[in-house]
Image (cartoon, helix red, strand yellow):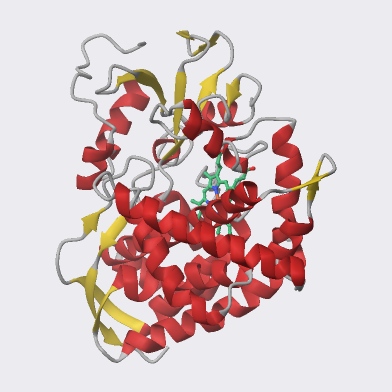
């Protein structure tokens, strides 16, 4: 560990219990200042390097040869070989040359034409979601608003028929509770049902092709071979997890930021041209994916600290996005912030988020409806947070508001 003398870092704890109470920005502030490459112990005797500076997150993200996504996967916990093999069916947990081949296939679901169509539907979806609650003067923001647009968008993208949506909402909620350290069994059962659904859809699209991502996937070939059911399942799950609660929680944190900073909502109502910078600021401030992990493939030195081959290296986007060397007054929520070089979608490089433009469109559509139509939003009770050090999540957020005439 490289730390400044005289600074006590014995209380640093970036694991799930801490995140269930709050996002540990005070700890990140301390680490960036005194130990930007910090050895963090884990209860099982393992440990990882916690990387908290913006420049280092970018450097690591752009050097996949030295910092592998496949070796130990992109998640912090150590996995057994069987689980690793399953995780490596997802693009997130692949290295080249396999990564490029699979990413090209997944990218077939993200063509400008597909995205433009989804974005077009997004505004109408967001308006409908807010229509359903606006007259009530209160709602549970997470389930009633934040979760709706992302799940509907993903279901449409995957080509799931409308009547399956309510069950998908239930299943994704169960899978997300599986991210919570206390809900893992439910998460696995839900994943099994999603796999079965995926198998049925794949069979249906093989028999009767449509213009959707599932048809593209069942016809895609890697090295002359069609994807098997296990690979298709992993795509399905990757998109559902990557596209859903990332966006949902970003919307949750944006709501919280506006409750805490009502003046910023006033600015947005007064000047629509602020929306593009506002969405970037919501992304920076909310950072719904707290980190991704890499594993060093070789001995390497970072800021004078020796990292050994095989060591886990965890990039904290949540910290990099508050790095005072890059962002002036980083803990301030400022809808006109510019420049805003946040790393919420990753630090650049080959794994950069495929859904970034789709996520931005959903955040903008939803938050624009919220700002225009929900007046004076207030928390009706304290929020509950997800017990996860990976997804920076909110599970429950009761709010009250007045009805505004958009
Ligand atoms: C606010 C919302 C979102 C956030 C914060 C987010 C964050 C991220 C991050 C940090 C990565 C980089 C992973 C790495 O470097 O290891 C990533 C990758 C990815 N994201 Fe997103 N994402 C969001 C929305 C979406 C959406 C809506 C979709 C799909 C519909 C999506 C699909 C993906 C996929 C497929 C990858 C893997 C790319 C690869 O490994 O090559 N994401 N995302």
Residue 390, image quadrant: top left
The correct choice, above or below, for 13 with respect to 153 in the image is: above
The correct choice, above or below, for 248 with respect to 227 in the image is: below
Q: Say if residue 181 shows up in the picture.
A: yes
> Quick one: quadrant of the C terminus?
bottom left
Where is residue 303? Give x, y as percent. Answer: 48, 13
Where is residue 374? Give x, y as percent. Answer: 33, 81
Closest to the observer, 221 or 309:
221
Residue at point 38%, 84% (across, down): 373
User: How many numbered discs?
Assistant: 0
The correct choice, above or below, for 28 with respect to 391 in the image is: above
Where is residue 42? Give x, y as percent. Answer: 29, 23
Closest to the observer, 164 or 247:
164
Q: Say if residue 293 shows up in the picture.
A: no
Where is residue 313? Give x, y as percent. Answer: 46, 23
Left/right placement of residue 165 relative to residue 255 reads right
Left/right placement of residue 15 relative to residue 89 reads left
Residue 52, image quadrant: top left
Residue at point 35%, 11% (across, down): 1
Residue at point 22%, 16% (across, down): 7
The correct choice, above or below, for 228 with respect to 14 in the image is: below
Residue located farthest toward the right when viewing the structure as drawn:
224
């Amino acid at each position: 560990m490289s730390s400044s003398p005289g600074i006590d870092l014995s209380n640093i704890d970036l694991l799930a219990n801490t995140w269930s109470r709050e996002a540990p920005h005070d700890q990140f502030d301390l680490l960036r200042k005194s130990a930007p490459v910090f050895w963090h112990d884990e209860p099982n005797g393992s440990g990882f390097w916690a990387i908290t500076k913006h420049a280092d997150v970018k450097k690591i993200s752009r050097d996949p040869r030295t910092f592998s996504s496949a070796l130990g996967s992109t998640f912090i916990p150590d996995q057994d070989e069987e689980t690793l093999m399953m995780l490596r069916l997802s693009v997130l947990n692949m290295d080249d040359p396999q990564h490029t081949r699979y990413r090209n296939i997944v990218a077939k679901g993200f063509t400008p034409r597909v995205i433009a169509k989804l974005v077009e539907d997004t505004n109408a979806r967001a308006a409908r979601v807010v229509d359903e609650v606006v007259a009530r003067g209160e709602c549970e923001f997470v389930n009633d608003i934040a979760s709706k647009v992302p799940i509907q968008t993903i279901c449409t993208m995957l080509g799931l028929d409308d009547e399956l949506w309510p069950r998908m909402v239930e299943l994704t909620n169960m899978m997300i509770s599986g991210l919570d350290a206390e809900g893992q069994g439910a998460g696995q059962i839900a994943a099994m049902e999603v796999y079965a659904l995926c198998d049925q859809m794949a069979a249906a699209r093989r028999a009767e092709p449509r213009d959707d991502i599932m048809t593209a996937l069942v016809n895609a070939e890697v090295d002359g071979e069609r994807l098997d059911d296990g690979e298709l399942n992993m795509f399905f799950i990757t998109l559902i997890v990557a596209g859903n609660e990332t966006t949902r929680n970003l919307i949750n944190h944006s709501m919280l930021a506006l409750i805490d900073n009502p003046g910023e909502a006033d600015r947005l109502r007064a000047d629509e041209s602020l929306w593009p910078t506002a969405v970037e600021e919501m992304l920076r401030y909310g950072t719904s994916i707290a980190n991704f992990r890499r594993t060093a493939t070789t001995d390497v030195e970072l800021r004078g600290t020796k990292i050994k081959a095989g060591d886990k290296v965890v990039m904290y986007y949540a910290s990099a996005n508050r790095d005072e060397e890059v962002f002036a007054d980083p803990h301030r929520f400022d809808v006109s912030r510019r420049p805003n070089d946040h790393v919420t979608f990753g630090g650049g490089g080959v794994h950069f988020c495929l859904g970034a433009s789709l996520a931005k469109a959903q955040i903008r559509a939803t938050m624009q409806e919220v700002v225009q139509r929900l007046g004076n939003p207030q928390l009706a009770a304290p929020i509950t947070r997800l017990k996860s050090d990976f997804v920076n999540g909110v599970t429950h957020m009761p709010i009250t508001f007045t009805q505004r005439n958009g």
